[in-house]
Image: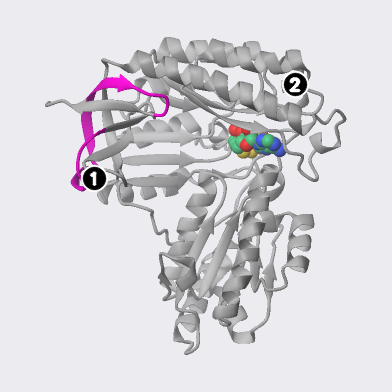
Amino acid sequence: MEHKPIFVTPAQDAARRQAMEEFRALPDRPKSYFIVTYGCQMNAHDSEKLAGILDQMGMQEVPDRREADFVLFNTCCVRDNAERRALGNVNWLKELRKDNPALLIGVCGCMVQQPVMAQRMLKQYRFVDLAFGTHNLHELPQMLLKQVKEKRRVVEVSNEENLICENLPVKRLNDWHAFITIMYGCNNFCSYCVVPYVRGRERSRRMADILREAQELKQAGVQEIMLLGQNVNSYGNGSDNGETFPELLRQLDKLDVPRLRFMTSHPKDLSDELIEVMATGKHITNQLHLPAQSGNDDILMQMNRRYTREDYLRKVEKLRRAIPDIGLTTDLIVSFPGETEAQFQDTLSLVREVGYDSAFTFIYSPREGTKAAQMPGRIPEEESSRRIGLLIKEVEASTARVHEAMVGKTENVLVESISKRDNTQVSGKGTRGITITMDGTEADIGKIIPVSITSAAVNTLRGERIER
Ligand code: SAH
Ligand code: SF4
């Protein structure tokens, strides 16, 4: 059951705006910023909000952290290596302080929200000037103002886990693609995962607010909207006003933005109604990220995923029946505590059976405070390396089969970038989410171009423009 969100009040919005004004008027304030982002797309979108706020505070984003007066690390703690990379880079920044003593260093996001980690980091890294958790993002103006005025470290980590802040400025990475967060937090408590502890309780934005944001994006010419949430399928769960995920998709589809994507979907909540909306919607792309995590029932149970391999495969079958050319992608974990060789083999065979377009593959990483961190049967590093190596090979073989089968088909490509090595080549994604490369120029970026797929490689497909 979803928790009732607590919306940031107009008075709190006014306090934020006032702090922004006061900050802008300070004679000796930081003038430029650089944000370093780790982790998932939710974090990438949070950074777009942070940038939007900093712009409104009269600061300018610079392309190199060495030129910035304020460097902010938006951290991730979902796995150990994300943490280590962030800490390494924060430490490296200490060197920059030697050249620029006025440099302000900030750390925010999931790592700061985790009490043990935050304490450890703040003690070890005395040079960090500002630290705030995931529930304090909207208070950045007040925190920065305080830091600059009082010239002392400011730390804010709220435990208000049900908060939703509308009306924040967003500085989008580009003008043809946009993220919209539809729900925050997670109530699933998969036994390995720290997200529910650092992102708070599951809560959904009001449908009217989402539709308004999408409408504005449409008017701005956005070609693709990506809806974000830890478990988008449970959008509106428990609401008594019909605000469900399938209904939200139906409404968004009517806006006629060319492409609608969403992630992440939890298999347990993938309903027949959602499959039907995906199949009938005009703009919902034929792609679904459906994290399986494991192909073995005992491991799935210990992970607290609340579906079996059979349940998962049945849903895949339903999806394929409704949307024959759907591309499926997934997340998989090897070396969950106590995972046997046979259980690991079940994950390999799941990859073969489903035939994923691609997959994110992870070695289990124990997270403090989670249930799995207490479980016996830690798998040695060497064995984990072997397993992840085999899994990656299996996924690559699956990708290769999918790519081969695409040759000769037509796809609409939303061009995203021009090749750094060869400026006659551009690449982008088809509706199925696979990267396609073709001849083109800078002017193609942000446009949807029909192509015929001419050849396949492991990481990309090659296409040739077709005249319509
Ligand atoms: N809410 C999404 C994704 C959350 S985190 C979902 O439920 O699918 C993204 C991925 O990181 C997860 O799908 C999982 O595969 C991986 N992950 C999370 N915690 C992990 C851990 N402790 N060790 C290894 N991988 C982990
Ligand atoms: Fe983590 Fe599970 Fe929630 Fe995904 S659904 S964020 S894996 S607890």
Q: Nearer the viewer, mark 2 or mark 1?
A: 1
Q: Up-down: is 13 above or below 244?
A: below
At which x and y percent is residue 18? 49, 78
Any magenta on residue 446? yes
On-image quarter of the C terminus: top left
Q: Which residue position is annotated with label 2?
A: 299
Name the residue located 45 percent from the left edge and 86 percent from the top edge: 25
At which x and y percent is residue 86? 63, 55
At label 1, the amino acid type is Asn
Any magenta on residue 209? no
At which x and y percent is residue 418? 28, 44
Q: Which residue position is annotated with label 1?
A: 423
Disc 2 residue lies near ligand 1 with CB under 8 A = no
At label 2, the amino acid type is Ile
In the image, which residues are magenta? 438-459
On-image quarter of the N terminus: top right
Q: Is residue 332 visible?
A: yes
Q: Up-down: is 199 above or below 120?
A: above
Residue lying farthest to the left in this orientation: 467
In the rendered structure, the answer to whether residue 266 lies left or right of residue 279 reads right
At which x and y percent is residue 306? 70, 23
Q: Is residue 1 visible?
A: no
Which one is earlier in the sequence, the residue at label 2 or at label 1? 2
